[in-house]
Amino acid sequence: MIRKDINKIIELSRERELTPEELEEINSVLTSDYDHFEELIEEIKFNQLWHKLEKPKPSETFKDSVIASILRNDINDIKPDSNWFFYHTRKIAALAACIVLVVLIAFVSLNKNRTLKTTEIAKSIVSVSAVLQYRLPEVITDLDSIKKINNDIVVTDKELLEALR
Amino acid sequence: MSVPQDPDTELMLRVKRGDISAFEEIVDRYKQPVIGLVYRIIGDLTEAEDIAQNVFIHAYRSAKNYKVKAKLSTWLFTIARNLCLNEIRRKSRHPAESLDQITEDKEEHFGRDIPDKNSSIAEELILRMELETLVKAALDDLPENQRTAIVLYQEQGLSYEEISKILGCSLSATKSLIHRGREILKARLKPYLKTGHWETTERIKKLSKKSGF
């Protein structure tokens, strides 16, 4: 048997499980007086051994789980990009309301020659922020009340909160 | 270098364009080989399935950066190997005993389920179980890169070139890695390769005859 054929058999034994007929044929062609007879048989057996091993089977839901994970990730990825404004509406509204209120307070105090103490402003901002955080929808619909504040001379924390409520 | 003959490349290019059905086809084609490789490296089927799922999720996320440089299988196996290495590193940092492992150990201690004596495939099953255990034990003793190389070569039928790309080492280093690994395994599995049967199987046969199976 020439070396080329032997290599071909070995390569074939690695690629797939040989049929009993093929193994029989190899046995009949090979002779024990061949120099590397044992080596060759060992090599074929070693290659065949891998085809006998059990192949782990994926679960039936494997593909569905992969696709579901991908789609879930896709949705999470899309949100901030395409609907960025919608996604951050609450934060933007809260920030805008805070700015408006600070400007209002400053405007009132300047017009009436009455300077509000820094602590008062800080307290107002903290109170407003706290309210905004929990009562944002009401705050937005109550813009009319906020507008009224502009006409008042003195704005106290209590009035401000009442207006906001 | 482009690989136009790889039929999977076209599928991956479709995925790149956002075609999810093409990706489903890829998952169908490669779920078994990927789980097979991960299972041989990690040694736990449940974990292997989880990691294999991550392999495909990673592949999908990287699809927009996909360039036709190698076969798709090579790319998937590379991702699989990297995720396995991450898992091995994570385990070595936070070693924990798996509950499954405890159950398996107990089962092994009290003896495994022996197939029905009336079943015609009982002997075949015992043989396969033994073979599986011995090959697994022999593989587990190899270093990770050698184990991966052997599995890719023997079980997945990859070429030396493809394996060298997955392992990220030279062609000659890959050949030598596989050669040495095969020699070690052959030495460990010598009894089977010499006779074609395990010594224990012969013992089981004799016991079966005695007990009238």
Image (cartoon, coloured by chain):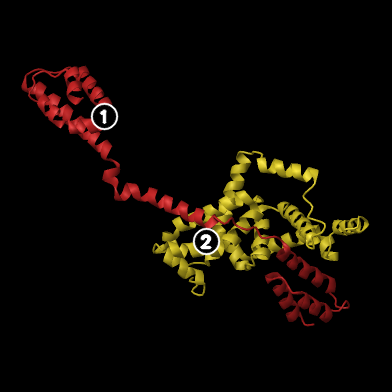
- Label 2 to label 1: alpha-carbon separation: 48 Å
Q: Colour of chain B?
A: yellow
- Crowd tier of the residue under label 1, counting other residues whose Cα lies within 10 Å: few below 14, some 14–19, many 20 or above: some
Residue that appears at 73% across and 73% down: A18
Which amino acid, mark 2?
Answer: Val
Residue plotted at (69% across, 43% down):
B101
Please indicate whether residue A97 sits to the left or right of residue B162 in the image: left
Which sits in the foreground, A83 or A4? A83
Residue B56 in the image, given as x and y percentages of width and height: 51, 57
Q: Looking at the rendered structure, which numbered label has been put on residue B27? A: 2
Badge 2 marks a residue whose secondary structure is: helix
Question: Percent position (x, y) of residue A136?
Answer: 25, 32
Indicate the quadrant where residue B163 lies: bottom right
Q: Is residue B160 above or below residue B37?
A: below
Circles 2 and 1 in contact, beta carbons < 8 Å: no
Which quadrant: the C terminus of chain B?
Answer: bottom right
Residue B14, quarter of the rendered image: bottom left
Q: Position of residue B71 (x, y in %)?
A: 53, 67
Disc 1: host chain: A
Name the mark on residue B104.
none
Q: Colour of chain A?
A: red
Q: Residue furthest right?
A: B210
Is residue A110 rendered to the left or right of residue A91?
left
Q: Which residue is mark 1?
A: A135
- From this view, report whether residue A129 is shown above or below residue A39: above
User: Is residue A96 in view?
Assistant: yes
Query: Of the residues shown, which amino acid type is indicated by label 1?
Result: Arg
Please give the name of the residue rendered at 21% of the width and 30% of the height, measured from the top-left corner: A98
Q: Chain of mark 2?
A: B
Q: Is residue B67 visible?
A: no
Q: Are marks 2 and 1 on the same chain?
A: no
